[in-house]
Image (cartoon, rainbow, N blue to C red):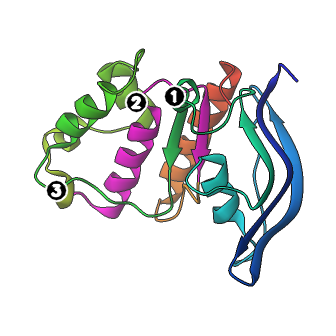
């Protein structure tokens, strides 16, 4: 119980008459890399939204680090990279990263973020709306890592990445897991 980063117990989610998630249970240990797989419409994003506390389960219980997902102490321990990339127009990449870092008690340094995500000095000076698709994905990854999270949650993180970026992403994920991150 103490070693679980994520616990999903008998969770069901209904939207009106439709069942999006039907009585699922699983747990993810600290330091583990896990994937939720299934065809389109299987409820994967709904499960992620419930784990993040963005949606409430109709039935069942979700705990992160043995607390409810909307607990402030939990929120300080998670980093998220969603499928949709949206950026803050008008701000430069380094400004967005500094803003996000300021939200957390023990953020990663800018140097660490740049190293982990392969953002370039040029990227850091670029306004977010001017970034290419791949650069936006790297920014999203950097934002997920900004707070030095214990738990990282990704929804289709490598969509739009080229082969070398995907390889680097997964290398980084495995390195983070080796440090005990989930």
Where disc 3 sits, the SS reads loop
State the residue in front, 70 or 94.
70
Residue at numbered disc 1: 72
- Residue 7, x across and y down, in percent: 81, 39
Residue matched to label 2: 146
Precedes in sequence: disc 1 or disc 3? 1
Mark 1 or 2, nearer chain start: 1
Residue 89: image tag: 3
Q: Do the residues labelled 1 and 2 touch (CB within 8 Å)?
A: no
Say if mark 2 contacts mark 3, CB within 8 Å. no
Quadrant in which the N terminus is drawn: top right
Q: Position of residue 90 (x, y in %)?
A: 10, 52
The Cα–Cα distance between marks 1 and 2, rounded to whole angstroms, is: 17 Å
Write the residue at 22% across / 53% down: 88
Packing grade of label 2 (10 A; few <14, some 14-19, many >=20) is many
* Residue found at x 20% / y 52%: 128
Q: In this view, does 176 lie to the left or right of 178?
A: left
The residue carrying pointer 3 sits among few (fewer than 14), some (14 to 19) or many (20 or more) residues within 10 Å by Cα, namely: few
Residue 148's x, y, as percent?
Answer: 48, 23
Which residues make up the magenta segment?
131-154
């Amino acid at each position: 119980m103490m070693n679980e980063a994520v616990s999903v117990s008998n969770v069901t989610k209904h939207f009106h008459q439709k069942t999006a998630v039907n009585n699922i249970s699983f747990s993810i240990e600290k330091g583990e890399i896990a994937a939720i797989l299934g065809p389109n419409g299987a409820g994967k994003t709904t499960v992620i939204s419930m784990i993040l506390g963005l949606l409430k389960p109709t039935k069942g219980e979700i705990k992160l680090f043995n607390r409810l997902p909307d607990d402030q102490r939990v929120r300080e321990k998670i980093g998220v990279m969603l499928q949709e990339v949206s950026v803050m127009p008008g701000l430069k990449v380094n400004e967005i990263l500094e803003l996000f870092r300021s939200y957390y008690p023990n953020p990663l340094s800018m140097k660490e973020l740049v190293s982990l995500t392969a953002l370039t000095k040029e990227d850091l000076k670029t306004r977010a709306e001017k970034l290419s698709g791949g650069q936006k994905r790297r920014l999203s990854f950097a934002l997920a890592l900004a707070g030095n999270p214990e738990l990282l949650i990704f929804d289709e993180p490598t969509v739009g990445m080229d082969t070398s970026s995907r390889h680097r992403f997964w290398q980084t994920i495995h390195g983070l897991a080796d440090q005990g991150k989930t």
